[in-house]
Image (spheres, rainbow, N blue to C red):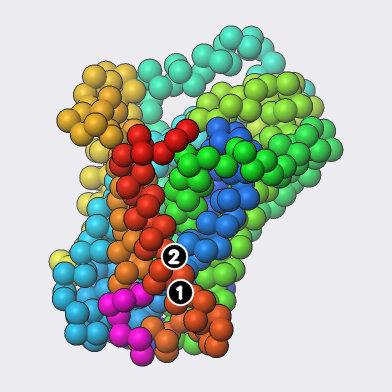
């Protein structure tokens, strides 16, 4: 438990109750829809093995160094993300404007929270669907047996047409997230991860092993790990870096915030490595969980949100015990999504508590209401508001409704910019003494990390931003 005081300078500041509580919470933040929905979909869209191996390289060379930088800033500052960056800037005699890095992160986290909870709502819908199916037809057969293939295919498009149902489910998901965030760091956020993450791992491994015996496991391995260098094109590399950031929750001040609750005795290099390792393993296992099921059912493994919300329900239909597996699967996805949405809500909440000195429960409620409102607008952007393109005047975002604009602005712009600024701040601006004392590295590893943060991360991220904004620059 960090022995520092809160924003009033008197009451002790909240913190994780132990090192492992921090690791579980950070793994909970990192492991989410990004691993389970986005990773398999991106791998399918980008040619399997080439994407996967390049993704792993991105995690090691760009993701991990930035993750260590973010937790380091937070742990050093022992305050909300903006305040933590400002403190380190002040001690390095640098401008207070650097606090803007985290300010940007607070805005991005809020934007992601809004559309993330809409997807969380979809997960609730499928949990309800499979639970009702069990009540009707028991657990031994396949799932949704009294539906035709066309009816299953229509489920997801129909849900997306139903703005009201999506809004209600979104509000429920936001409310559940709020319940944990309002209870505080060790009392709520940590509890969610300590209970939900082990349950998540048991479900993931159980379903994967079941899929390995009943599904097309060797085909899935070949699909995910056969490296074909000719498939490693510019856009594939870009997709891999973007996925690495989203998956590790970087560039949105989330890991700065979680790092600020860490005690001085924790070795940040070790914990960051554990977090990155766990997150990457879950993404790979998710691939090995989903593709055998999909390939065995003879369905195409094309990416997109349809992989989880359309192809998988189909696949569960022809699987023995499909209803049970389907229900377990969506509960597992729900757990992972919840621990991530909690971290997303915590970022603006911690900032507002520091800034306005209000109580946690009230602050979190205000943020939750605002996120739910933006979520409802996003839900209607698939139907009634589909003609409303808030950023239509920017070519990069033309034609995108609120939901997809929130996703694009954060993943193509704000997250890479946030991570770029973090690496410049830690690599070049912060005083070496502060960084060296805090990072838990020594000797050659320390020098290598510094090289990555100073050179590789800023250059790679600038490149990604340029080709992300001007996609025409890259050959396909
Ligand atoms: N990393 C989370 C996931 O994979 C998403 C997330 C992004 C969470 C940014 C917090 C901050 O689903």
Mark 2 vs ligand 1: CB under 8 Å? Answer: no
Rounded to the nearest whole Å, what is the CA distance between mark 2 and mark 1?
Answer: 7 Å
User: Residue 162 at what x, y percent from top left?
Assistant: 37, 19
Q: Is residue 275 left or right of residue 300?
A: left
| SS under mark 2 | helix
- Which numbered circle lies on residue 451? 1
**Of 275 and 317, which appears nearest the observer?**
275
Q: Which residues are magenta?
A: 426-433
Residue 185, x across and y down, in percent: 40, 68
Q: Quadrant of residue 333?
A: top right
Front residue of 396/462: it is: 462
Contact between marks 2 and 1 (CB within 8 A): the answer is: yes
Q: Is residue 336 visible?
A: no
Find disc 2 in the rendering and name its residue: 456
Eyeballing the image, is 429 above or below 347?
A: below
Judged from this view, the residue extending furthest toward the right is 213
Residue 314 in the image: above or below residue 305: above
Residue 428 counted in the magenta span: yes
């Amino acid at each position: 438990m960090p022995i520092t005081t809160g924003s009033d300078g008197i009451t002790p500041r909240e913190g994780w109750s132990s090192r492992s509580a921090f690791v579980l919470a950070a793994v909970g933040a990192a492991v989410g829809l990004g691993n389970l929905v986005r990773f398999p979909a991106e791998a399918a869209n980008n040619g399997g093995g080439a994407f996967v191996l390049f993704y792993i390289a991105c995690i090691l060379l760009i993701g991990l160094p930035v993750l260590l930088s973010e937790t380091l800033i937070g742990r050093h500052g022992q305050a909300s993300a903006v305040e933590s960056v400002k403190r380190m800037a002040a001690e390095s005699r640098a401008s207070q404007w650097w606090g803007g890095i985290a300010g940007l992160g607070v805005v991005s986290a809020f934007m992601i929270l809004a559309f993330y909870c809409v997807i969380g709502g979809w997960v609730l819908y499928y949990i309800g669907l499979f639970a009702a199916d069990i009540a009707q037809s028991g657990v031994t057969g396949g799932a949704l047996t009294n539906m035709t293939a066309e009816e299953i295919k229509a489920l997801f498009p129909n849900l997306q047409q139903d703005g009201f149902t999506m809004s209600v489910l979104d509000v429920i998901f936001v409310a559940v997230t709020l319940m944990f965030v309002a209870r505080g760091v060790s009392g709520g956020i940590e509890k969610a991860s300590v209970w939900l993450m082990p349950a998540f791992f048991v479900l993931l491994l159980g379903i994967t092993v079941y899929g390995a015996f009943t599904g097309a496991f060797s085909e899935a391995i070949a699909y995910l790990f056969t490296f074909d260098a000719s498939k490693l094109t510019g856009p594939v590399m870009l997709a891999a870096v973007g996925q690495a950031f989203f998956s590790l929750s970087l560039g949105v001040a989330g890991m700065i915030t979680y790092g600020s609750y860490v005690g001085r005795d924790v070795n940040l290099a070790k914990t960051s490595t554990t977090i990155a390792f766990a997150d990457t393993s879950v993404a790979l296992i998710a691939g090995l969980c989903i593709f055998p099921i999909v390939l065995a059912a003879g369905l195409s493994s094309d990416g997109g949100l349809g992989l989880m919300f359309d192809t998988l329900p189909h696949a569960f239909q022809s699987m023995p015990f499909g209803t049970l597996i389907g229900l377990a699967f969506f509960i597992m996805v729900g757990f992972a999504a919840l621990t991530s949405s909690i971290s997303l809500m915590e970022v603006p909440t911690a900032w507002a508590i520091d800034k306005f000195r209000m109580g946690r429960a009230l602050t979190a409620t205000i943020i939750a209401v605002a996120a739910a409102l933006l979520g409802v607008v996003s839900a209607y952007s698939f139907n009634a508001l589909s003609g409303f393109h808030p950023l239509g005047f920017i070519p990069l975002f033309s034609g995108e409704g609120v939901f997809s604009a929130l996703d694009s602005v954060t993943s193509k712009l704000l997250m890479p910019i946030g991570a770029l600024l973090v690496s410049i701040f830690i690599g070049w601006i912060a005083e070496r003494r502060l960084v060296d004392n805090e990072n838990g590295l020594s000797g050659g590893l320390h020098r290598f990390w510094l090289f990555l943060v100073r050179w590789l991360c800023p250059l790679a991220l600038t490149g990604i931003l340029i080709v992300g904004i001007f996609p025409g620059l890259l050959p396909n």
